[in-house]
Image (tube, grey):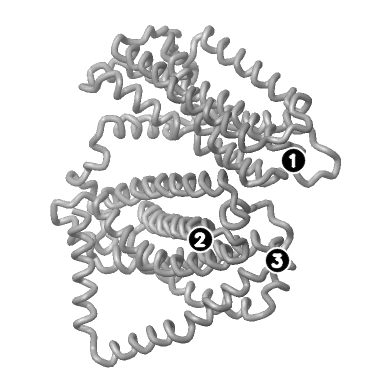
Amino acid sequence: MIRLILDTERRALLNYWRVLGESRKIVYILIGLLLMLILLPLVTTLLFSITASIDQGYLDLLLLMLSLASAIILVLLSIHFIIKDMILSGSIALYMSYPISAAELFYAKFIRHNLFYSTSILLPLSVVVGAALAARDGQWMLMLNSIIYFIVLGMFFTSISFGLVFLTANMMPVKKVSEILAFLGGMSFLLIYIIMFIVADSFTGILAMFPEIPISFSGILYDYSPVAGILGPILMIVAAIAIILLTKFIVVRAIDRVGITEGHSTGRRKAGRSSISHPVIMLACKDMKLSFRNIRELAVLLPIYVLPLVLVYFSSPAEAGAQFLVMEGSQLVSTAAGGALVTALYIGAHHTARDAEHFQMLQVLPVPGSQLAFAKYIFNILATVPFLMIIFTITWFFSTAGVDILLYMLACILLVCLAAVPVGMLIGSSNPVVSRKNPSRRLDTASNIIITMIMFVVFMMISMLPFWLEGNVMGVRQGLIIINILAICAVAAWFVLGRVAGRYDEGFKITYKD
């Protein structure tokens, strides 16, 4: 179905070109020749020469500025054209009259807009920048990494544009949204000229005015290293897939809730809900709604999400006047693993024990315990991994560690959560508590003692890290050994998840209080 929608879009574009007047065709052809023969070679030569000759100390700032400038321009451009294509044209109403789901329509429109307004600009940019970086270092793998980086960046920009359009469409009439965001889209053309005017001056002098930034592309886009050069693109692709799926959820929800004809609500659609038809996805969505519906639930879990920052404080004795955290790479990785362990254990136990409140309903559902446990596992991973990655990425910004340590941290957080969440679910399903006076109390005394003891041991070990790891530098060999061990633990945790699935089939031993 997605191919049919894309073919329809292609035919519509060709028909639009056929019905154009001769004068407008001539104008478009002249503009295209002007861009291809004059502006594009000029920009390509300028960007290649700057990237190839700039001092290595300014490379991180140059790449960051290119990314931010691309973000501002492409997001506003995409917003303008998404509004024009999906709201003002009324094409969504026409597509929805056919047996097409909102998810299929989103994927087709996403591919179209990403190819036209992001990839068409960022792909040539990535080739130019990648060729310049590869030529200056003599490492041609940088070309591939540059292409992957900018293409994934374009997917992020397209996802942000779709999210902004349809999140706003959920809160106010679509017609008003189109007027506001179309104005912002038109402002992107002015921004292009402003940026070109600034760059026309001394570029190196402008870069020298900026302070030192705590972001490094070393190992990925320049000064290639095998670990960062392989893990970096993989993590970027995984993050792009995650944000596209999140954007799909927002767009599908907006189409079903708000409607798309002239800004009027058309009510919730009955058809096209195949995007949440799978029991695992439906159960995970149920958990998500339960988490955000209850303020007390968020108040109980908020200290657990802040707990990793306390671990960072204990493992990093600050020096007077220091601008960065006094932490080595091994300390950062160990702190991230310890924070992920404690957080994943408690979050997994708390959310699993919450099912005791409506366990009779779960038993009535025609869903086996394996799917119930897997849905809870997916939800717990989504409730821990992104937040921990954000927290420790911010922590890394204020440290002196390199980008390879960041990649090790993110990989350790993911693997520790994959291994610890099933253990937390096993603890939470052992003897959950249902209390009327204190609904946020989910765990019994024994479960609380077990998790508290684990927290105490982790705190003690993390606080002793500065003395144990003093002078030790974390290398590729140590990092790969740690990742392999954690990967084995994450695979072994599936046996624990099978035990949790058995408890869903057998029934929880629930304690009712008050």
Give the foreground label among 3 and 1. 3
Classify residue 102 as left or right of residue 196: left
Disc 3 to disc 2, C-alpha distance:
19 Å
Q: Nearer the viewer, residue 114 or 41?
A: 41
Which residue bears the numbered disc 2?
143
The image position of residue 333, as x and y in percent, is 63, 33
Query: Which residue position is annotated with label 1?
Result: 325
Give left or right: position of 247 versus 90.
Answer: right
Residue that protrudes farthest toward the front in the picture: 138
Report the front residue among 86 and 490.
Answer: 490
For residue 436, say whether it is visible.
Answer: no
Q: Judge by depth and name the residue closer to the eye, 5 or 294.
A: 5
The amino acid type, in three-letter code, at marker 2 is Met
Q: Residue at point 69% right, 20% down?
A: 461
Sequence-wise first label, 3 or 2: 3
Query: Residue 394: in sight, yes or no?
Result: yes
For the residues labelled 3 and 1, the Cα–Cα distance comes to: 27 Å
Disc 3 secondary structure class:
loop
In this rendering, the answer to whether 290 lies above or below 168 is: above
At x 45% / y 8%, what residue is drawn?
514
**Image location of residue 502, percent across then percent down:** 32, 13
Q: Secondary structure at mark 2?
A: helix
